[in-house]
Amino acid sequence: MDIGSVNYLPYEDFVDVFGNVVEKCPLITAAVWSRRPFSSLADLEASINDFIDALSESGKEGILRVHPDLTGRDLQSGTLTRESREEQVQAGLDTLTTAEVSRMARLNTEYKDHFGFPFVICARMNNKATILRQLEERLRNERTIERACAIDEVKKICHLRLQGLVVPETSNKL
Ligand SMILES: NC(=O)N[C@H]1NC(=O)NC1=O
């Protein structure tokens, strides 16, 4: 779909197509529909990011809290969203050894106990080694810094999901 077609979508269709660009947050998509017409894919993405940035700190934490754990229960039981499953599989998180699964589970729990929201990272920009390393490193962050870091990862995930849905505009200039 190109951005021109996106601008013609009624809100029901817009939410159907873009409702999960921020994991389990269709409210963001529904709100951003009011900002159309979008001049470009980057403009649509900027509207989503502006909406996120305008949220209170507890609102941002709410976005993080609806994310599934990496390699958690949902991956094992097949109850992830399609997007999340594809991303976790692409990062190789379905091929962890038993020891790696235990390590990830232990670190995820430690992280959640410490910050009160789950560890979020753009899986497609990483692999299992870098994810485990980041999880260990980010556990040591101060809370405000870590929340900002996790929200940046949500934006990266959103960026890649949008790219899979909208054809980037080609320049008409010669
Ligand atoms: N917990 C977490 O990071 N989950 C996300 N990461 C990603 O790339 N897709 C997700 O659902």
Image: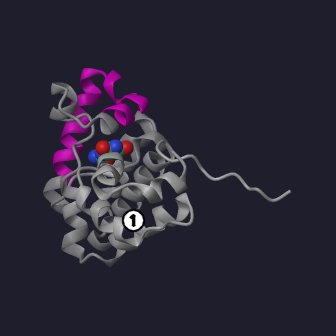
Residue type pointed to by label 1: Ile
Above/below status of 44 relative to 88: below
Q: Which contiguous range is marked in magenta? A: 85-111
Colour scheme of the rendered structure: one colour
Q: Is residue 6 visible?
A: yes
Percent x, y of residue 159 = 47, 53
The one nearer the camera, 54 or 18, is 18
The one nearer the camera, 13 or 129, is 13
Percent x, y of residue 61 = 22, 65
Q: Is residue 145 visible?
A: no
The one nearer the camera, 159 or 126, is 159
What residue is at 15 percent from the left and 33 percent from the top? 73
What residue is at 57 percent from the left and 46 percent from the top? 167
Specify the quadrant of the image occupied by residue 70: top left
Q: Which residue is mark 1?
A: 48
The one nearer the camera, 37 or 53, is 37
Classify residue 147 as left or right of residue 167.
Answer: left
Indicate the secondary structure of the residue bearing disc 1. helix
Percent x, y of residue 43 = 52, 66
On whether residue 98 falls in the magenta region, the answer is: yes
Classify residue 26 as left or right of residue 173.
Answer: left
Above/below status of 86 relative to 107: above
